Structure formats: C-alpha cells, structure tokens
Image (spheres, grey):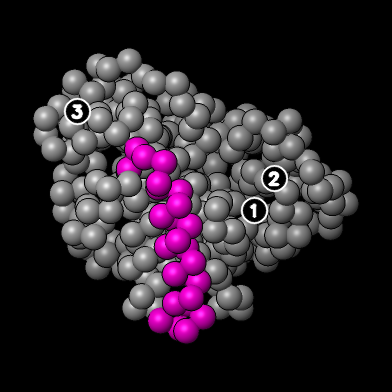
Amino acid sequence: MVVPTLGRRESLLRVLSALAQQLPSGAFEVVVVCDGDTDGSADACRGMAATMPYPLQIVEQSTQGPASARNRGIAAASGDLIVFLDDDVLPDPTLVATHIAAHAGQMHMASIGPLLPPADVSLSVWGSWEERMLCRQYDDMVAGRWEATHRQFYTGNAAVRKDHILAAGGFDPSFKRAEDVELALRLSERGTKFVFLPQARGWHYVQRPFQAWVRVPAAYGAADVSMARSGRPEILGTAVWQFKSRRLPVRLLTHVCVGRGITNMVVRMLGTMIRLADRWRLRSVSDPLCSLIFNLEYYHGLAGALGGRNLFVRLMSNKLSPTAICLEPSPQHTR
C-alpha cells in the first residue's frame, strides 16, 4: 500500500492506526511517502512502526507533488499489487482484502473503491456537495447505468498491479492534479479494465478551504488540455459535448466570465452566497451554486491552458476543431 502525505500528521496517524484493523492483518505492507515533512509526520510514523501488525516503511523527499511521491512509493514497495490510499481516507476493515480478492487471477485490471462522506464530522458545504456528487456516480455504477472508466480512478482509494504501472511509465510528475486520471488513461490504452468495488469503502475526511477547493476544477480543466495535446484531441471533443449539455446558467456565466479577470470576483461572490445559504440550511440553493462554481472554474482552467478566451469560445462554438486546437503551440501556464 502506498500513502503519500504532506502536512496532515494527525490524519495520517489515524489512517495508519485504522490499517492495523485490516482483515486479515499482516497480509500487506505500507509505504508512507512524506512529500516534504512540514509537521514531523516522518518521525511520528517511525515512532509507531514497531507497534503496527504490518511492515511500515517511511520514505522522505522534498516537496515535489503527489505524482512524484506515488512514484517513490511504488519503487519502494515490494508487493505485486499496489493499493493507493490518501492520508485523509479512513479505510473500512475489509478495504485491502476486497482489493486483493478482486485482483486474484486478473492480470489487466484496476480496482476503484468509493470515497464516502464520514458520519462523525461536518464537512464544509462545498466538501459535502462534492461527496454527494461522487456518491451519485457510485450509485450509477452499482445500478449498472454506466461502467467505471479511467475517469473514476482516484488514487484516494484504488489498486493496480505494480508491473502495469511501471510498464505505463508511472505517474507524470508534471501533473499536479489529475495525475491519477492521466495515468489511468494510459493504462486504459494498454488494455486495463476498470472495476468499481462498492465494498472497498474509504471514509474521506476532506477539509479543503474554499480557495483550495476552487483550484481543483481549474486544475482538472488544465489537465484535460494537457492530455488532449499529447495526441488525444477526443478529450476536448468530450469537453465540448459536455459543455453543450450543461444547464443554461452554467453556459451563460461561462461565456460572460471565462478567460476574463472578473472570474475570481464572481467566484468569491458566489462563495459568499453559498455560505449564507448553508447558514440558513438552504441546500436547494447551495448545491446549484457549488455546481455553478465547479463548472465555471473547470472551464476557466481549460481556457487558460488553451491559450485564452478566444480559443475557448471558438472551440465551444465549433469554429475550431479539437484537432486544430491540439496543433496550436502550448501556451506557458502553470498546472
């Protein structure tokens, strides 16, 4: 098992303690990769290593991002199957065993476990909304309305064979977000099948402040452009199709704001409205606003990575094809 961490000492120690309750115990190892130790996480892990029923290895590196940290963990792991777990995901006692059982006799498979909202803490209004959106995806997969794909391969709770990861080239450290989806895309192109395991439950204690939360969809938009420009223009074709299917308020606000300096101001204003709606317990108001912000930031990030508003508008209005966009020189931007 590979657990990257940065600045979440108490949460990490809870996760490691919960892994001691896995059934059967001792059937796995844990590699913790401290991606820059800012809070004494490495020493705290070493202090509890002797008390754990599983081998616990601690790897330290300067802060290089989650992709690099996971690559270091994969290199240090001795097992054939790599189970990924985030440092804020508390595993059910059968999480590891469920992943292991699913891979028995399966050579080209990646398993995905759910990231579920915990019952013992109150998440932020935007964190709660995000968890509900994930749970909606899980319900759809369980009901057979659609199958799991690389898009659901979130390394907060997932597993794949080590040799397949290495054969695909590992995680791309240039991606600071969506590095797991990008690797999964390459795995998919190599014939990997993705399977959702509803019983491999992990409880996601996500605690992102608002400004950190809005950076997530923007980074996903930029990552989609990067993946498209690596010879996969169909990713932008999907983005265009999805944009046309969005609700009218999303499309209107995107056309007004995206690629312009007013986006940050509008997002801050909508964030204030979300907090007010949450205070008055108006989920019928806060949920659509969260969706509006998430979509707006995604398209804002996508437009920035494309090279600006003009290219974004031309792409979404079918005046420029995804293939032509991908032939444009990549602008200088930060993912």
Q: Position of residue 231 (x, y in %)?
A: 28, 21
Q: Secondary structure at mark 2?
A: loop
Q: Position of residue 301 (x, y in %)?
A: 39, 39
User: Magenta part of the protein: which range?
Assistant: 258-282
Q: Is residue 20 visible?
A: no
* Residue 199 covered by magenta stretch: no
Q: Amino acid at mark 2?
A: Leu
* Front residue of this view, candidates 51 and 141: 141
Q: Between marks 3 and 1, how big is the CA–CA gap? A: 37 Å
Q: Earlier in the sequence, mark 3 or mark 1?
A: 1
Quickly name the residue at label 1. Answer: 87
Foreground tag (1 vs 2): 2
- Pointers 1 and 2 in contact (C-beta within 8 Å): yes
Q: Earlier in the sequence, mark 2 or mark 3?
A: 2
Residue at (35% x, 38% y) in the render: 259
The tag on residue 6 is 2
Q: Compared with residue 330, is residue 244 higher up or lower down, i.e. above or below? A: below
Q: Earlier in the sequence, mark 1 or mark 2?
A: 2
Foreground tag (2 vs 3): 3
Quickly name the residue at label 3. Answer: 322
Q: Compared with residue 49, is residue 10 higher up or lower down, i.e. above or below? A: below
Residue at (69% x, 33% y) in the render: 63
